[in-house]
Image (cartoon, rainbow, N blue to C red):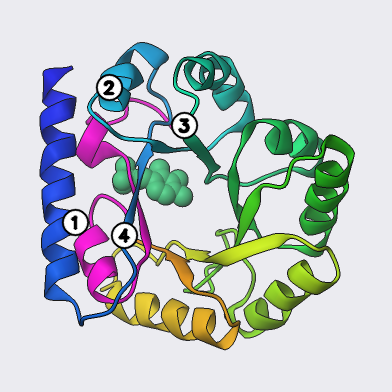
Amino acid sequence: MDEMVERLTSVLRKIAAAEEAREAGGDPVTLVAVSKTFPGDAIRPVIEAGARVFGENKVQEAQQKWPELKEAYPDIELRLLGPLQSNKARDAVALFDVIETVDREKIAAEIARESHRQGRRPRVYVQVNIGREPQKAGIDPDEAVAFARRCREVHALEVEGLMCIPPSGEPPAPFFERLAELTDQAGLSRRSMGMSGDYETAILHGATSVRVGSAIFGARTYA
Ligand SMILES: *Cc1c(COP(=O)(O)O)cnc(C)c1O
């Protein structure tokens, strides 16, 4: 447990150093601690150490551990980082404060409908398939700007920014730069990019939030 707190401190220090190293004037970077596969008992010390923004990949898994934690720590912000099926939109809108994986019309419409029904309005990110990988979720980069506009104007979603996961095994910087350009073109200001292996690079290229799992919680044994 202490080890996780030490790793959290080290990640926060590296984020601060990367913020210092980039060009002046960037937004403060939000750390999203990715707690997928880890139980509530493992998450609590990280909350106690000060982390307040958490990410999960699966609606069902998050439902099992977060309602209790959110009740105990009401200022926590919970983000959905994994693919959302339309039959889970109701549960996702009820639990998550931010949904980072909006990548098609149907999901945008479902989130809009549930937001209206529940009187909750999660902030959303449009996920961009920045490396155009067939197996990966996300909208094509060429369609991202128009889709983000439709999410705002047609579905009245609170679109905060764009999110991407670059292809593994390639230098990520050009993909981060492309996401930054698309975010500007869409008139948005938040960019969710960078994970345990590349979050410092992502910050140097304009990330405003980084999603860090294993560098804080340790290696995952599944999923
Ligand atoms: C699991 C996951 C992360 C965190 O990955 P690490 O390499 O453990 O930091 C970040 N973003 C998404 C979308 C994920 O699924």
Q: Which structural element holds mark 1? A: helix
* Image label count: 4
Which numbered disc covers residue 29?
4
> Mark 1 or mark 4: which comes first in sequence?
1
Residue 214: which numbered mark, if any? none
Along the viewing direction, whichever of 35 and 48 lies nearer the viewer: 48
Q: Quadrant of residue 125?
A: bottom right
**Residue 113 counted in the magenta span:** no
Contact between labelled residues 4 and 1, with CB atoms less than 8 Å apart:
yes
Q: Secondary structure at mark 3?
A: loop
Label 2 sits on residue: 48
Q: Nearer the viewer, mark 3 or mark 4?
A: 3
**Mark on residue 15?**
1
Q: Nearer the viewer, mark 2 or mark 1?
A: 2
Label 2 close to label 1 by CB (< 8 Å): no
Which comes sooner in the sequence, label 2 or label 1? 1
150 relative position to 187: left or right: right
